[in-house]
Amino acid sequence: MYIWGTALLLLLLLSPEQAKSQDAHWAKGEELEWRFRPAHLDTALAYVGVQEFGNNEGPEIEMFLASVHLGKGNPYCAAYVSFCLAQATPGPYNPTVRSGLARKFKTRDAVKASLVLRGLEVKPGWIVGWEKGNTVYGHLGIVIKWDGQCGETVEANTSSGTFGSQRDGDGVWIRKRCIEPGNYFRITWFTPVEYE
């Protein structure tokens, strides 16, 4: 509803010529991309810009953590993804995972990043997973759009730019990410999110 209301407001503020041009732009498919965006991705994007207070603390951060029965101070990238999936109405039927541990989202339906590099299509709303070497440590995000090696994601517990911690940052940010197989901390899989 918010997107349609914003679109209507913009059309009302534009001159008739600008509105006609904007309608033509949307007719080419850009509006379809937004209209059919998965509900959990809408929820994820609503929290962009939320920042921590202290170390993994703050009202929204603690709300994400509480959704997976964790207290303040814990890493929250997976809790954020869990929260967004749980808030979607109607919710997705796959994956059913709700956890504070990123690696739990690497389900049997997950696809290897190497397949994505070979041309497998990643859809908006899919979960993207990082692994730190062969450790249990990882990171999660939600795909906004992806094309080949690189894409745009929304992630929690990351930094807003290219500097700072990428898996233990200060808030929820939109990031440009790439599959880089040689890195120690790297994207290794994507998990599809499926609705009825």
Image (tube, rainbow, N blue to C red):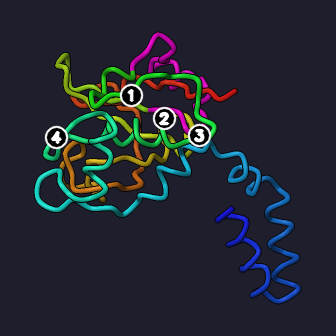
62 vs 20: above or below: above
Tag nearer the camera, 4 or 3: 4
Type of the residue with mark 3: Pro
Instruction: Give the label on residue 124, or none.
Output: 3
Q: How many marks?
A: 4
- Sequence-first tag of 2 and 1: 1
What is the CA distance from the residue labelled 4 to the residue labelled 1? Answer: 15 Å
Residue closest to the eye, 94 or 126: 94
Marks 4 and 2, Cα distance to the nearest angstrom?
31 Å
Separation of marks 1 and 3 at Cα, in angstroms: 19 Å
Q: Report helix, strand or loop for mark 1.
A: loop
Span shown in magenta: 106-127
Left/right of residue 24 with respect to residue 191 in the rendered view: right
Determine contact: label 4, label 2, CB under 8 Å: no
Disc 1: which residue: 98
Q: Which residue is mark 2?
A: 149
**Sequence-wise first label, 4 or 3:** 4
Q: Earlier in the sequence, mark 1 or mark 3?
A: 1
Name the amino acid, label 1.
Arg
Among numbered discs 4 and 2, the one appearing first in the sequence: 4
Question: Chief secondary structure of the magenta span?
Answer: loop
Residue 74, disc: 4
Q: Are marks 2 and 3 in contact (CB under 8 Å)?
A: no
